[in-house]
Every structure is written in C-alpha cells, then in structure tokens.
Image (cartoon, coloured by chain):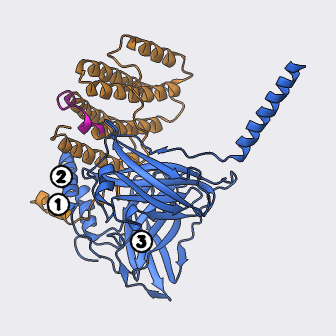
Chain colours: A blue, B orange
Amino acid sequence: MIGERRWLVMLVALLLVQACGETTPPANPVLEGQPGGPYRMTLALDPPLPAAGEETRLTWQLTHSTNGAAVTDLQVLHERVVHNFIVNLDFSSFAHIHHEDFRAVTADDLKRASFTLPYRFPSAGRYRVVSDFTHHNRNWIKQFDVVVGRPDASTVAVADFTRSRQVDDIRGSLSVSPPIPVAGYETELVLNLTRDAGPVTDLALILGSEAHVALWRQDGQHFGHTHSYTPHMASMLRAMHDQATDARRRGQMMADMMVMMMSMPPELVFHGPEIPVHYVFPEPGIYHLFIQCAPGGKPRVFHFALEVLPWREGMQTRIDSIVTSGGDH
Amino acid sequence: MQTRRTLWLLALLSPCTLAGHGLLNSFSDLQWLPAPGRTPDQWNYRLDWWQEKSALLVAGDNAARFTLCLDYMREKLAEAEAMVAKSDTEAARVAMQNYRAYLDQALALLGAALKQPAARARLALTHALLEHQYMLSVDYPDLPVGPRTVLTALMEELNKRYMAVRAQLPGGDAQALFFKEEEVRWSWEMARRAGEVPP
C-alpha cells in the first residue's frame, strides 16, 4: 500500500514538472557570442526571460580569449565603440543601437570593456543580436540568439521582393546591378530617395556615413554591415583588381589603408537622391537588407529582400555602376 | 609610380570600408577551430590516429571519406596551434604532418569517384583552405613569437596548395573566390604587423 502511494506521489511530481516545463519559456542565460576566435564576448539579459514590449537591459562584456582580461583599448568606428544590430529572425523588426545612444561611455566602461543599453523587443520571437567592434585596426563581430516570450513555432520569414518602400514621407526605391546578384561577385545596390515625388537632396550623415546597411541571409546566417560606396572606394577596388600589382603587395596596401584611415573625419559625399552601396554576398540565398539613412537629418530604415544566385556559366556579373572612380559624384 | 598612386587612393577611403566592417565579410559565419582534444604531446595521441583511420575505413563512400578528411584537417590545425601555444614545436610539427596527410588524402579522393560532382568537392576544399589560412592569420599574433614561425611556413604552403586546387576550378567559380582571397591576404598582413609586437 505504502509502495503504491509512493508511486502515486512520484507520478504526480513528474506530471507537475512536465506541466511547469510546458508553461516556462526557455531561459536566456549569459550568452556566449559566436563565432569564437581571439575575443570572448558575453551578453547578459535582465530579466533573463525578456517579454515582448517590456524593457530588457542588455549588457555586453568583451575579454581576450587567451587570458580572460578585458579588452581595454577598443577603437571608435563610425562614432561608436560597439555597434549592435538586433533583428527578429522573421525579419519583422530591426534596430541599430549603441550604448552611447543612452549615455556616454565612461573611462570605467572602457576599462571593464562592458557596455549596456535598455531595449524593448517589439514582439515575441527568436532574435539575433550582432555586436560589431574594432580592435587593433581590425573589425570583429559576435552573434547571440535571444528568445523573447513564447515564439510561435509556425512563424516563418517571408521575403517581399518589392523594390520600392514608403517610410514616413520618403519613398525609397532599390536598383541592383547586375540585375541578379551572384555570390562571390560585387553587387551595386542603389537606393533612390524621393519626397512628394521630388528627389531628396538633403541627405545628412548618420553615424559618419550616408547609409548603414545591415543584412542577413534568410536563415539568419551571413551577416554583413556596409556603407555608401564612394568614388574613392571605386578607385580602390579598381586598383585591387589590378593584377599587375603583386598579390602580397595588395594585402599590404589594404592593411596600410586600414591603419591610415582610422582617424579620418566623416565626409558627406552623396547629398541624394541616390546612395550607392557595394557588397559581395558570400553565399547564394535570399537576403534581407535594412538600409538606414537620414533624409533631412531624420533616420529612416528601408527593408528589402534580394535573391542571390550561385555562379553559373553565362551569368552576367558585370556592374553598370553609377559611381565613377576618382572624382566627386 | 602606380603603387604610390594606389596608396594615395587608399588613403582617401573611409575607415574599414573594405574588410570586416564593410564590403567584405567573407568569414563572418566561420566555424572556428574545434578544441584540440588529444594532442601529439600526450602518450595516448596514437589512439586518435587509430580512431581516425578506422572511421575512414568504415565510411560508406568516398564522399563521406572526403568530408572526414576536411574535419580531421581542422582538428590537426587546432592541435598544431595548441602545441605552438605551449611552445612545443616538435609536437606542432607532428600535428602539421598529420594535417598534410589528410589534405593529401582529400586531394586523392578528388580524383576518385565521388557522389557529389568533383567540381563541387574541389570548391569545398578551396573554401576550407582559405578558412584555415584565415584562422591561422587571426590566431597568429596571440601565439608565442619564436615557436609560431612553424605556422608561417604552413601558411605559405597552404597558399601554394590552395592556388593549385583553385587552378582546376571552372573560371567563374575561381573568380568568385577573389574577395575571399583578398580578405585572407589582408588578414595575414595585419597578423604579421601585429606580430611585430610580442603578445
């Protein structure tokens, strides 16, 4: 009899545990940034189970993988120490956000290599947070996956290939060259902005560039972050393709450029209506692009989707560029 | 004159517009080297060798063997780096020798019948060789100054072997690797410069 009661108690306990498991969403412990490498970045969430629409504090810490010491000499790039991109993996929301947007980075923050900000995840879902930092003239990214609320397992990312978007009073139209981007080859993306059917000519810099583009493949892989493509960059790319220059020398020149350019002041090259961007999509697939720019000084984000194909015999990879190298646009 | 002009043009670029934070992000989703596991300085390292040989022997087909060779190359590279970090260059050389053996086997399998088209397998190998060079270049500055010279030699050898495989790719596939190659070159150059200052 006692034995039967013990089994009954155990069965009830088991059912309770199972029931609790069903009602408790998965927790986000301190998250470890991926990929690995010489730096370790962690992301702590407070509360550890963020709820949609409620404030969550995100705190990052960056250390050297080899000895666990804080990375104390981070460089400022595009006016921020760490750039963070937060995207719902169904691509329904996007944010480009920084510690400095809320309060100045202090000497103590830099000494501890610890940065924090509040964020409200707009809806339940699976999010990817990408943090981008610069150290010793090299740029690095770390990615984290965050679960918010109780994601609907049936939600899938949908790609809308429409090439024109209205955000507030601004219409952004995207043109692409070559018309079908090919993985491994350069693609030129041009955002054309209009306001009340007239061209936008009052573009302002946003974080040191006319445009910030964050992109992911639809499976959440292959994050990229790039900016407007200037005539000087066009000249550089032409030089890079110059096979007369020794390959090792090309690597040295690129490294020289990185070192020299860290302290260059930002410059507004494109006033509108067009902002060209170049990118090399690393792999085929459907990509989601979030282009952030500031017509009239007010930041706006345009979301587009593009299909990138693998190279096949006979494909067009040539770019009909609107950017002429060497001079002003 | 041409070089000076190019350098001048480079100087006009905005910061980091090319690699990493910019146009090129070829390695943003790189799967980093695994934990080294058993290393050549351990008495039971031979067990690894037996396990690997057995796995290759019982693998279902050449495609599976090819994939295993790529996995083992990553493991051997991790072992080599771990041994350099411990300043044990002899053990690092053993790991590198094993790395070469698996690379040779992968190349030999390319000539054999594979389920996947040989061109696709060859492309996978070129990507692997570029990724290995990139990871070596990233880890290099954190390794002890003297012992890491063994990896410099490996880096140069990998580049030569990569170029040999690349030469057998269809033109468009090879051309699509251009930016990845440039990023590796840039990364290696940055590593050498960082390496001028002992970590």
- Give the residue at the far left of this rendering: B1
Q: Which residue is mark 1?
A: B6
Q: Which residue is mark 2?
A: A245
Q: Residue B78 at x, y = what percent?
A: 36, 29
Q: Image point 45% across, 12% down: which residue?
A: B50
Q: Residue B4 at x, y = what percent?
A: 11, 59
In the image shown, does B127 or A291 lie closer to the viewer? A291
- Give the residue at the far front of this rendering: A2
Give the quarter of the image for residue A81: bottom left
Label 3 is placed on what type of residue? Answer: Val
Task: Specify whether disc 3 shares its chain with disc 1.
Answer: no
Is the residue B197 above or below the residue B80 in the image?
below
Label 1 is placed on what type of residue? Answer: Thr
Q: Which residue is mark 3?
A: A190
Q: Secondary structure at mark 1?
A: helix
Q: Secondary structure at mark 2?
A: loop
Q: Is residue B56 left or right of residue B193?
A: right
The chain to which mark 3 is attached is A
Q: Image point 15% across, 59% down: which residue?
A: B7
